[in-house]
Amino acid sequence: MTVATPPAGQPTAKDFASDQEVRWCPGCGDYAILKAVLKTLADLAVPREQTVFVSGIGCSSRFPYYVSTYGFHTIHGRAPAIATGVKLANPELDVWVITGDGDGLSIGGNHMLHVLRRNVNLQIILFNNEIYGLTKGQYSPTSRQGTRSPSTPLGSVDYPVSPGAFALGAGARFIARSIDTLQPHLIGVLKRAHEHRGASFVEVFQNCVVFNDGVFEDFTAKAIAPEMQLHVQHGKPLRFGKGDAKGLRLDPARLAVEVVTVGENGVTESDLLVHDEKNRTLAALLLGLAPPAFPTALGVIYCDPAATYEEQAYEQIPAGASVARADLERLLHQGQTWTVAG
């Protein structure tokens, strides 16, 4: 991995690009995500010698080779565990986890659950293309029912995992979503994730042009995007559609949201739900929305900071002591011990 001396003055995206050849399929959404991350790093002017990218296995996991920082290309599903170790060893490091829907939610699902509930201060970017791309198109945990693939030739019968709902259930304190081609939006989301103290979970809808092309067309196609994308902003009414004509209103009888049109049937903006990033119940409702009945919620859906894992772990070290000087022998023999007699 190439590690260069940080440039003088405001860096550019090129300053964070490594000298390695980027090897993804032409047209892959990973290129757009890489571009957004490089721009984010440049805008934030992060110290490259204090930045670490950790990945698992999959197309997305080539990422550390393409960023001019420190990095680890680890084993399948274990990036959260490796990243936790890096952060605990040196909490001053800025650590990013790069994973995919297969890597992070199948073999790595248990690791993802624990890194989120522990609230380790990491930026976790999950590339979701609803397919296994690296191993030639098998269905993944996020693949929709009916997905035909080499491993499900008659169509998948599995119920898919919602990455956002999974993260919320695991106890994540920051959950956001964006799309690979929405560069300004994605960069804004990544900056918010970096700003957050604790585990930041960002799902990026990413197109796989070879094995699952156009799977997100029901909300990303240019012609219908305004009607099928809900860009949430804290403190703002949940409006969408051309001219923000539509919105979401709570139906108290069913404890569910419904789509309404402002100006019709007496509906005014005051009837609409207002986005509150700290409202966990609202986050669950937003993460459950899906076309064609509802738009897909994008942006920072949930953000409720709490003490980080490494902060609390280091607080347990007695004043003036260090892990390196701990008396391991005394530690192993303290408390309840037994002598086994012959």
Image: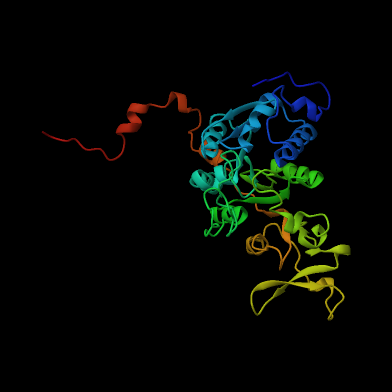
Q: Is residue 95 above or below residue 5?
A: below
Residue 269 location, x and y as percent? 83, 71
Number of numbered discs visible in the structure rendering: 0
Seen from the viewer's position, the closer of residues 135 and 55 is 135
Quadrant including the N terminus: top right
User: x, y (%) of residue 34?
Assistant: 72, 36
Seen in the image, is 273 located left or right of residue 127?
right
| Residue at horizontal 83 percent and vertical 64 percent from the top | 241
Where is residue 230, by image quadrant?
bottom right
**Camera-nearest residue between 68 and 306:** 68
Q: Position of residue 181 (x, y in %)?
A: 77, 45
The answer to which image quadrant residue 32 occupies is top right
Q: Position of residue 317 (x, y in %)?
A: 49, 34
The structure residue drawn at horizontal position 72% and vertical position 66%, both measured from the top left corner, is 294
Residue that protrudes farthest toward the left in the picture: 342
Residue located at (37% from left, 27% from top) = 328
Q: Nearer the viewer, residue 220 or 69?
A: 220
Which quarter of the image is occupied by the C terminus? top left
When asked about the image quadrant of residue 42, the answer is: top right
